[in-house]
Each structure stands twice: as C-alpha cells, then as structure tokens.
Image (cartoon, rainbow, N blue to C red):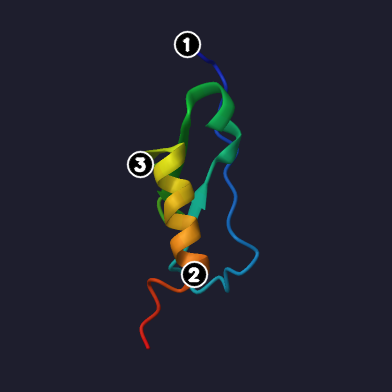
C-alpha cells in the first residue's frame, strides 16, 4: 500500500473556461492508476483509470478520434 498523495495538474492547453479536468500522473508507478477529477470540485470524487486505459484515451485524443467535425 502506498501513502503517496496525488499531485494534481491541469493541461497547459486549458483555457480556464471552467470545463477542465485535473490528473495526478504521479501515482502511475506506485498505484498503476491515473486519477482524474473535475477541477471545479477539487474535494469531490476522482475516477481512477488503469494506466493502459488512460494511455489509450490520450492516444485517441491525439489522433483526433473524438473531434466533432
């Protein structure tokens, strides 16, 4: 079991419009998960994604799979 605390950060692409998520990538090695939370609710719940699932999601975003064009 780990006692590491999440270190939350927002993307540098975030325009501070209120629709942001924060991730805590520092838990990847110790816990094997990437926690994600709503930046408007920092004390609210976080979703913990397995590393491979989160990596697939990021790859899909970079590839444009979720673009609304």
**Residue drawn 57% across the image and 22% down it:** 4
3D distance between C-alphas at marks 3 and 2: 23 Å
Residue labelled with disc 1: 1
Label at residue 63: 2
Q: Is residue 50 left or right of residue 63?
A: left
Q: Is residue 40 above or below residue 45?
A: below
User: In this view, which residue lies farthest toward the top?
Assistant: 1
Residue labelled with disc 3: 47
Name the N-terminal-most of marks 3 and 2: 3
**Residue drawn 46% across the image and 66% down it:** 61
Q: Position of residue 41 (x, y in %)?
A: 40, 51
3D distance between C-alphas at marks 1 and 2: 35 Å
Figure quadrant of the C terminus: bottom left
Q: Is residue 59 above or below residue 9?
A: below
Determine the secondary structure under disc 3: strand
Asked if labels 2 and 3 touch by Cβ distance under 8 angstroms, the answer is no
**Residue drawn 51% across the image and 52% down it:** 22
Asked if labels 3 and 1 touch by Cβ distance under 8 angstroms, the answer is no
Q: Position of residue 45 (x, y in %)?
A: 34, 41
Q: Nearer the viewer, mark 3 or mark 2?
A: 2
Determine the secondary structure under disc 1: loop
Name the N-terminal-most of marks 1 and 2: 1
Q: Position of residue 2 (x, y in %)?
A: 52, 15
Name the N-terminal-most of marks 1 and 3: 1
**Residue drawn 47% across the image and 63% down it:** 20
Q: Callout 1: 10 Å neighbours few (<14), some, many (20+)?
A: few
């Amino acid at each position: 079991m780990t006692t590491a605390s999440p270190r939350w950060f927002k993307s540098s692409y975030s325009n501070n419009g209120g629709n942001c998520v924060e991730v805590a990538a520092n838990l990847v090695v110790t816990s094997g998960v990437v926690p994600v939370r709503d930046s408007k609710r920092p004390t609210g719940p976080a979703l913990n994604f397995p590393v491979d699932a989160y990596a697939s999601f990021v790859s899909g975003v970079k590839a444009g799979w979720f673009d609304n064009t």
